[in-house]
Each structure stands twice: as structure tokens, then as C-alpha cells.
Image (spheres, rainbow, N blue to C red):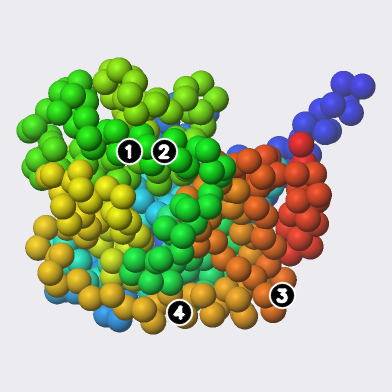
Amino acid sequence: MVRVRSLLSGLHLLLLAASGLAQTPAELAAKIKALPRVSDVRIVGQAGNETLDITFLQPVDHRVPEVVAPGKAKFEQHVFLLHTGFDKPVILGTEGYSASRPVGGELRRMLGTPNLLTVEHRYFGRSIPNPCVWPQLTVKNAADDLHEIVKTFKKLYTGKWVSTGASKGGQTALYFKCYYPNDVDATVAYVAPINLHQEDPRINLWMETVGDETTRIKIKDFQIALLKREDEVLPLLKADPKQYSMGVAKAYEYGVLEYPYAYWQYGSNNVRDYSIPLPDAPAQELADAYKRVNAMYYYSDAGIKQFEAFQYQAFTEVGYYNYDITDFKPYLKANPNPTNMDLCPPGTKDKIVYNPATMAFVFHCLQYEAQNVVFIYGETDAWSATQMHLIGRTNAVKIVVKGAWHNASVRLAAPEQKDQFFAAMEKWLGMKLVRD
């Protein structure tokens, strides 16, 4: 028996070595550092649980791709790697914002022991060009970023590739699929809207029917009460004027208008523990309910800075929404003409021109051409207003998870939806997935 165990142990070590698992983090880092365009690799994390923080050189404008040539505008894009084996599947995490570590979500368990390669989106986190040239923040440039990374890492990683992201990260995965349809074997996009206008009217139409009528009425009455009783409620929030360059009152009113969108996207989960106050409730109850959704943060200096690149993308290419103020206009004292373009980077608001061709291309591609894609949406998510509509021209799968919001996942799906997901993914990847 000892001899058998010894032989099995030896075989296991040979398999680990063959797949790259037996390398030390330093050896792996050296191998990654030797790849084209990789300028730096840092080992982070505790011993035995190390990941790599990789700096990847990218052109600011991919139409001028010579990133190593003197005088060419370039920036450092951060990529995060958890390595399990060069022949193992790779989950390509297409972040829509900043990133700080490799993530795989629920797909990580399904794919067994995959490699995780997470890419921070250009113009977010530490992946911001200097100088920051806003017109180069385009859907195509971001897709080109991912293409260069995948092309480079495929020199080492030979397993199946699955791109995935949630919300704006899901959008990023879908845009990448449209521009580079053969770079990955499958794409799983969670709660990813496909907007078709700079301010897509479908979103406000959705807000008129989402959920149940009783809740929608309560929300609108609550909003009106917040505006009518602003002088009572606003002081209870203890907002620091130094953190709101646009003014605390204006930010407060923006937050009131944003409330139902944030409620249905994220805050609806709070209904399990809290109810929406009646209009004549004590001012403190109104303030507490308003704070729970935290919509006012987006209009603070910190919130605006955090999401300014997103807002630029929204109003130049990927679309967003504005507020229907019909029922609120009499009560908007500090913010009579609201527009989310106020949140765009300083100096860009009056220069922004929306390019409808980008999303027209994406929409057509997803309906008629993109294969091996799973779309996952939440039944009551605000962003399901502009969910992708399939017409049967591709093999794509769409799952709308009943009762879910922006937390929609395969795990929360109905049994028949899970069966549909696993059957499609196993066919596309040519491998068995791990189920619950």
C-alpha cells in the first residue's frame, strides 16, 4: 500500500509540473514578465495564496499601436492573475471599472480549477493614461485592450477561455465579443444592459411597470415627501458641504430623483427588513430610508470622481438615462433642470457628442452574429429595462431570474434555466462543468 501511494504521489507531482502548478510564484512571475508588453509583475498575497499584479503596456489609441516606440502615447493597464495551470481553463474577468484582484464569481467553481485573469478597465483605478485624453476612452479601444491581453496570454495558457463580467463588466464582455468574436470560447454576461440611445427612453418606461404598483406608488410618494420636507430631512443626513462641490441641496435632490433606480437595482433587497416610510412619517424615518439606498453618494465629489469615466462613456457611446421630473418639478428648488451629464469629467460636458453607431453595431452583432453567449438578467433590476432581446439567429442563451435584481446569477435561476445554462456551456467548451 505504501508503494502504491508513493507511485500515485509521484504521478500527481508529474501532472502538476506538466500543467505549471509546481512552479514557484517567482518562476511564474518571471515567465509572465517575459511576455510581450508586460513591463512589471508583482507577487501579492500570503504565502501559498499568491496572485500576480501585472502591468501591461497599452497604446492610448490602438490606431497608433507601437506602444514601445519613443513618443507614442501609452499607459499601464493592470491585470490580475491567479494561476492554476497552463492547460487549465481561463476565466477572463472583463471589469467595467477598477480592479484589485483576480475574480471568477460562480464560474470559478463550475470550471473546477480555472486560471483567473482579471483586467482593470482603461481610465479606471490605476489604469489611467497621463495625460488623460478623454476622446480615447472608447468601446473599441477597450475591446482592443482585451484583445492584446488575450493574444499575449494565449502564448502560455492553452485551455478554454471564458469571458465574463457583471453590469458594466458584462457590457465590456459583450462589446469585446462583438469586435473579437473568436478570442474566447464562451461569454457569460451578467445584468448587462444594451442601451440604444444617449438617454434611452425604455428605462423610464420600465420604471413605470417594474415590480408591483403598490411599491411604485409608495416610492413616488416617498420621493415627493423627501422634496417637500427637504428642510426637515436634509439636516438629519449630516452631509459635509466640503464633500459636495455641486452643493448639498442639489446633490440631495439628485439623490431623490435617483432613488427608484437605485432601489430597483440594489436597494430592493432592503424591503425584506425595512418598509418605505409613509409621506407623513417622522423626518428621521425618511432620512434613514433615504440613506439606506445611498443614492446621494453618486453626487458627492468622491462619487463623481469614481464614476466620471463611466459617465463619459455613457454619454458618448454606451447610453444612460435622464429623469422624468413631471411629478417632481414643483419641488426641485436647487436642481430645477437635472441632467446626469453634470457627472461627466470637468470640461467635457459641453463637448460631448454621442456616437450612435457603436451601440447599433453591438446590437446587430449580438442579435445576428455573436455565438456562445449567455445573457443573465434579474426580473426586477432597473437595468433589465434594456436587456438584450434575442431573435433566434444565434445559439445564445438568455436567462431572466425570477425575483432577482442586480444580483442575478445561475445559482438563483430556476432548475430548468440551470439545465439550459449547463447544457449550452458544456457543449461550447467541450467539457463537463461542476454543478451544485
Q: Which of marks 4 and 1 is nearer the N terminus?
A: 1
Task: Provide the residue designation for mark 3.
Answer: 392
Between disc 1 and disc 3, the foreground one is: 1
Q: Looking at the picture, tell me which residue is in the foreground, 225 or 385.
A: 225
Q: In the displayed structure, would residue 169 be above or below residue 287?
A: below
Q: How far apart are marks 2 and 1 (CA)?
A: 6 Å
The percent coordinates of residue 236 (x first, y second) are 20, 21
Which residue has dot 2 on it?
219
Query: In the shown orientation, is residue 155 left or right of residue 345?
Result: right
Q: Quick one: label 3, few (<14), some, or many (20+) residues within 10 Å?
A: few
Task: Estimate the spatial distance between the alpha carbons at disc 4 and disc 1, rounded to whole Å.
Answer: 35 Å
Whether residue 173 is visible to the viewer of this picture, yes or no, is: no
Q: Earlier in the sequence, mark 4 or mark 2?
A: 2
Marks 4/2: CA–CA distance: 34 Å
Q: Residue at x 47, y 80 (%)?
A: 361
Q: Do the residues labelled 2 and 1 touch (CB within 8 Å)?
A: yes
Q: What amino acid type is highlighted by mark number 1?
A: Gln
Disc 1 to disc 3, C-alpha distance:
41 Å
The residue indicated by pointer 1 is 223
Foreground disc of the pair 4, 1: 1
